[in-house]
Image (tube, grey):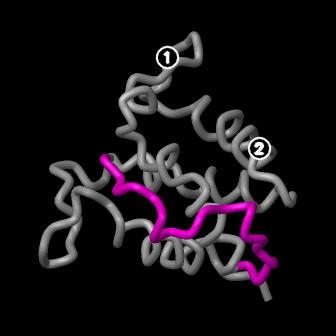
Amino acid sequence: MRPTLEQLEAAVRSEICTICAKRTAEGLCGDQEPERCSLFTLFPLVAQAILATESDDLQPYIDAIHEHVCSVCIDQRLDGTCPQRDQQRCALDTCMPQVIQAMEEALGRPVRAEKAAPIEAHQPVRS
């Protein structure tokens, strides 16, 4: 049985939020506007893009997310550039391999080591 959207979001939050640079010492979101986190604002679209993709390579996932999620994000400009992504302030873009890994694990799909970097090896998120 496939996990619900809420279960997928919880799985991603448990992996990504723990490495976010804006997390407080108490473990809470320290973002002044947590509802604007690029990863969770458009999470249903992120989940849909990942669910529709199955590959041993990250690039198809990245392409799907850019096409279906970034294209409707308020921060992306009409020419396809994104100041948030360029300044490494987009949690989705910064943690994309870890987001994909967390979702695939929640879906019970096998994850290959070369597909996504281990979370411990990733730099903290600046969302």
Q: Residue at x 54, y 56 (%)?
A: 43
Instruction: Give, as a single range, the part of the protein colored magenta.
Output: 107-126
Q: Residue furthest top?
A: 79
Q: Look at mark 2 in the image and give the residue it sits on.
A: 59
- Looking at the picture, which amino acid does disc 2 mark? Gln
Q: Residue at x 35, y 53 (%)?
A: 125
Q: Residue furthest right?
A: 55
Chief secondary structure of the magenta span? loop
**Residue 77: numbered disc:** 1
Distance from disc 2 to disc 1, alpha carbons, whole Å, reads: 22 Å
Q: Residue at x 76, y 83 (%)?
A: 108
Element at label 1: loop
- Looking at the picture, which amino acid does disc 1 mark? Arg
Element at label 2: helix
Q: Is residue 117 magenta?
A: yes
Q: Is residue 26 above or below residue 92?
A: below
Q: Are marks 2 and 1 in contact (CB under 8 Å)?
A: no
Indicate the position of residue 91 as horizontal and vertical percent values: 42, 49
- Quadrant of the drawing holding the N terminus: bottom right
Indicate the position of residue 44 as horizontal and vertical percent values: 59, 57
Indicate the position of residue 48 as horizontal and vertical percent values: 71, 56
